[in-house]
Amino acid sequence: MIPTYNENLIINAIEKVSKDVVNIASVRMAKDQLLRIFPIEGVGSGVIIDKKGYILTNNHVIERADKLKVTTTDGNVFDGIVVGTDKITDLAVIRIESKEALPFAELGNSDELRIGQIVIAIGNPFGLSGGPTVTAGIISALSRKLQFENGILELVQTDASINPGNSGGPLINTNGEIIAIST
C-alpha cells in the first residue's frame, strides 16, 4: 500500500503525462493455408516525446505492421509512420503528423533509479477506450536480465500491474518523467 502523503505526487505525475499516452492499433496482412489474405490486428501503447509527433513504443507493438493507427487521449486518430526500430532493446519510434503542436512527456534518467522508488505505469490495456489506465508500484529490481530470441534484455522490474496492451506505454517517476517503457 502506498502511503497517503505521496498521493498528490502520484496524481500530479499522472495528470502531467496521461494526455501524452496514445493507443496504437497495428494491422498486418497474413495468408492462411489456402493463400487467402486476412488482417491480424494488435494493440499497444506509446508515449509522445516531442511536439512534432514522435512517439516512443515497443518494437513488438509495431513490428511487421502494414498499417498503424494512433489514437490520442482527445480521440484524434492519426496514421503512424515508423521512424526507427531496435529489436534488441524492443524499442521503436513512430511519428504522427499533426497541424497542431502535440503535448509531450519529458524523458527522465533511468540511471538514477533506486529499488523501492514509487513508479507509475500508464497505458491502454486490452485496447479499452476512455483514455489510459494507470497502475502504481515500486521498482522491484534494476538491471534484471531476461533472455529472449533477439538477445538479452536488461530491464527495470516493477510490481505495478502491466496487462496486454500496456506494452509501449511509459513507466514514470513521481516527477512525471519517463524512466522506462513497459513491455
Image (cartoon, rainbow, N blue to C red):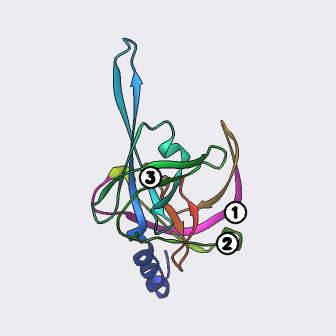
* Element assignment for label 3: loop
Mark 2 near mark 1, Cβ–Cβ under 8 Å?
yes
Kindly identify the amino acid type of the residue bearing the numbered disc 2.
Leu
Residue that lies at the very extreme toward the top in this rendered image? 34
Determine whether label 1 and label 3 are within 8 Å by CB. Answer: no
Residue found 34% across the figure and 61% down from its top: 72
17 in the magenta segment: no
Q: Would you place residue 143 above or below residue 127 in this image?
A: below
Give the class, few, some or many, for how many residues have Cα within 10 Å of label 2's Cα (few <14, many ≥20): some
Direction from residue 64 to residue 102 in the image, left or right = left
How many residues crowd around disc 3 within 10 Å: few (fewer than 14), some, or many (20 or more)? some
170 left or right, relative to 109: left
Q: Residue at x 45, y 48 (%)?
A: 81
Residue 127: x %, y % from top left: 34, 51
Q: Which residue is mark 2?
A: 113
Residue 178 image point, x, y percent:
55, 69
* Main secondary structure found in the magenta portion: strand
- Kindly identify the amino acid type of the residue bearing the numbered disc 1: Leu
Q: What residue is shown at x 42% (from left), y 80% (from top)?
A: 11
Provide the residue designation for mark 3: 163
Q: Position of residue 90 (x, y in %)?
A: 60, 48
Tell me the tag on residue 142.
Answer: 1
Q: Nearer the viewer, residue 138 or 72?
A: 72
